[in-house]
Image (cartoon, rainbow, N blue to C red):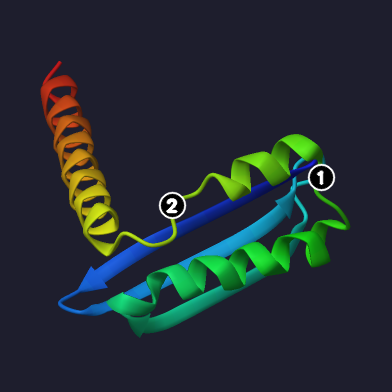
Amino acid sequence: MAHVVEGSVQRAANKVRVSAAVDRRATREHLWGQTYDRDLADVFAIQSEILGQIPTITGRLSPTEKLQLSNLPRRDLTAFDLFYTRAKTLAAVENYLRAHKRITFAGN
């Protein structure tokens, strides 16, 4: 794997902010980054825009990468909403556990 794609999704009511970045793995060189602020209903259009940028930035996609990208869900807003809610809950639990760990170990 020559490149790393990172990103985040933030949601407020029916608005969504998607941030994405591509870095060269070996050197950690930042190649591209973009933030998209749109209506939640446009989240799959954002995904398509990001996917359209990757070959331009990295030069090419391997057959495995093409297959992985073609299997991404792009139509079901309800599924996206459920995934986003679950991911947000998992992140909150992880943050709680990290904070609790700091408090627990701080007294020792």
The answer to whether residue 49 of the structure is visible from this angle is yes
* Residue 39, position as x, y percentages in the image: 31, 83
Q: Residue 73 bears which disc, if any?
A: 2
Disc 1 residue type? Answer: Thr
Residue shown at the point (30%, 67%) measured from the top left: 10
Name of the residue lying farthest toward the front: 75
Residue shown at the point (11%, 22%) measured from the top left: 104
Mark 1 neighbour class, 10 Å CA radius: few under 14, some 14 to 19, many 20 or more: few
- Quadrant into which the C terminus falls: top left
86 relative to 29, above or below: above
Left or right of 10, for residue 57? right
* Residue 55, position as x, y percentages in the image: 79, 60
**Circle 1 residue:** 27
Residue shown at the point (15%, 77%) measured from the top left: 13
Q: Nearer the viewer, residue 102 or 65?
A: 65
Q: Nearer the viewer, residue 64 or 25?
A: 64
Disc 2 residue type? Answer: Pro
27 relative to 10, above or below: above
SS of the residue under disc 2: loop
Q: Nearer the viewer, residue 18 or 106?
A: 18
CB within 8 Å, label 2 to label 1: no
91 relative to 51, above or below: above
